[in-house]
Image: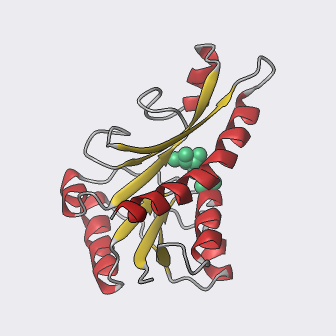
Amino acid sequence: MVKKNCCVFISGNGTNLNALIKNSRSYIFPINIKLIISNRKNARGLDLAKKFSIPYKIINMKKNLFENELMKEILYRKISIICLAGFMKILSDKFIKNFNGKILNIHPSLLPKYKGLNTFEKIIKNKETLTGCTVHYVNKNLDGGKILLKKSFEIFKKDDINKLKSKTQKLEHQAFSEAIINLYRMN
Ligand code: GRF
């Protein structure tokens, strides 16, 4: 199997990155992670890049410069799929257009519900009984691209924000990889 070269963008802990790295080590997983980009120099997820000897780049500049730098790296590494795994910066319409259909994001709610930030707070406030995560394509609308996969779980009365977060993340770690497998199975 010829694997696609993937770049993962992070800003934080990188638990989703960790799951992707682990799964990508299987020869039947359709992608290889060739590059990790962080817009924050202290992102804990960068430790994984070092641990697994994956090339990484910290790009911490204003949008235009940031994306120029990004493009250079992506072209150099022949990247054909980008996974946003907790990447907290909004990409420009131009960048998204350039990589149309090649950027995936994971979001901690059942989209189209609860786009944007503070998802768990909103879910609890609205007394939802079901939540989960969504893997979707990125387009110019925030958390609004075509949905590839959702995974859900029931919310119990005793579940607080931390509990929701940990249950959601557990599902996310399966969902991102599953969505990628499905994507290339169809292609
Ligand atoms: C995840 O919950 C993801 O849904 C959101 O940011 C979080 C990143 O977590 N977009 P991690 O850095 O992968 O641990």
| Identity of the residue furthest to the front in this view | 186
Q: Kindly identify the residue that appears in the image at 29 percent across and 58 percent down.
A: 63
> From what the image shows, is residue 30 above or below residue 55?
above
Q: Kindly identify the residue that appears in the image at 35 percent across and 77 percent down.
A: 79
> From what the image shows, is residue 62 above or below residue 32?
above
Question: Closer to the camera, 32 or 64?
Answer: 32
**Residue 173: horizontal and vertical position, in percent?**
63, 54
**The image quarter in which residue 27 lies:** bottom right
| Identity of the residue furthest to the right in this view | 158
**Residue 51: horizontal and vertical position, in percent?**
68, 80
| Quarter that holds the N terminus | bottom left
**Residue 138: horizontal and vertical position, in percent?**
33, 49
**The image quarter in which residue 82 lies:** bottom left
**Residue 120: horizontal and vertical position, in percent?**
61, 29
**The image quarter in which residue 61 lies:** bottom left
Q: Kindly identify the residue that appears in the image at 48 percent across and 55 percent down.
A: 179
Question: Closer to the camera, 187 or 50?
Answer: 187
> From what the image shows, is residue 163 above or below residue 27?
above
- Whether residue 90 sits left or right of residue 163 in the image: it is left
